[in-house]
Amino acid sequence: MRTVVDMNPWNWAAFWILGKGYQAQGRSYEACDAFSRAYAVQEQNAEVAQEYMVECLNVGKTKKAVDLAHAALQLRPDEAGLKANLALCLLIDAQVEIAQTMVTEAVEADPNDETTKRLKQVIEEVRSGKRPQPRRYADLKSRGQTGPRQILRNIESI
């Protein structure tokens, strides 16, 4: 795969596959780099933005993750999962009040999503002081799960 991306640095799909491979191996720094290169070519693809966002959270690039979550939501503004992802990024970025507003919108958009309701509870616990402010994604995630929807599923067991 490296040969393919070396031959054609504009092949966003090759970078996507490379990023997914690194992601599956738990190699977040390499995955973040691959997804950043895919995103540079394919900024209008919400899935690319989401995967890049996940890996930014994994490697501590929280501000970039917030930007990417905003970008994905601009592409698909009615998608509840993207609102929830943005709320999660905002929570980790210590923008708790804005995270609360965004997660409320996500729950209103999809009231049956148990993961988003759990995220709302976590944000409320942080706001009330019952839970410490997470500084990194690792403060919230459980082992063995990555990916844009799994990012929220990780907090189900918190």
Image (cartoon, grey):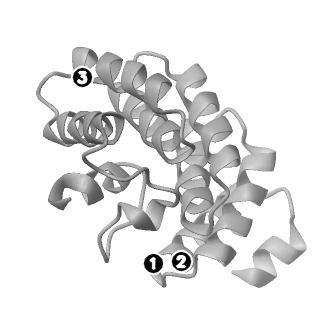
Residue 61 picture quarter: bottom right
Dot 3: few (<14), some (14–19), or many (≥20) neighbours within 10 Å?
many
Dot 1: few (<14), some (14–19), or many (≥20) neighbours within 10 Å?
some
Q: Which is in the foreground here, disc 3 or disc 1? A: 3
Residue lying at 49% horizontally and 34% vertically, measured from the top left: 86
Residue 112 picture quarter: top left
Residue lying at 32% horizontally and 49% vertically, measured from the top left: 152
Mark 3 residue element: helix
Please indicate whether residue 63 sits to the left or right of residue 116 in the image: right
The circle on residue 70 is none
The circle on residue 24 is 1
Mark 2 residue element: helix
Indicate the amino acid at tag 3. Answer: Val
Residue 79 visible, this orientation: no
Q: Quadrant of the N terminus?
A: bottom right
Number of numbered discs overlaid on the protein picture: 3
Pointer 1 with pointer 2, Cβ within 8 A: yes
Please indicate whether residue 139 sits to the left or right of residue 119 in the image: right
Indicate the amino acid at tag 2. Answer: Gly
- Expressed as whole percent of the image width and height from the top left, the position of residue 52 reads 61, 54
Which residue is disc 3 drawn over?
107
Q: 142 or 139, which lies in front?
A: 139
Q: 92 or 83, which lies in front?
A: 92
Which circle's residue, 3 or 2, is located before the other in the chain?
Answer: 2
Q: Is residue 77 above or below residue 24?
A: above
Q: CA distance from mark 3 to mark 2?
A: 32 Å
Residue 151 visible, this orientation: yes
The circle on residue 21 is 2
Q: CA distance from mark 1 to mark 2?
A: 5 Å
Indicate the amino acid at tag 1. Answer: Ala
Dot 2: few (<14), some (14–19), or many (≥20) neighbours within 10 Å?
some
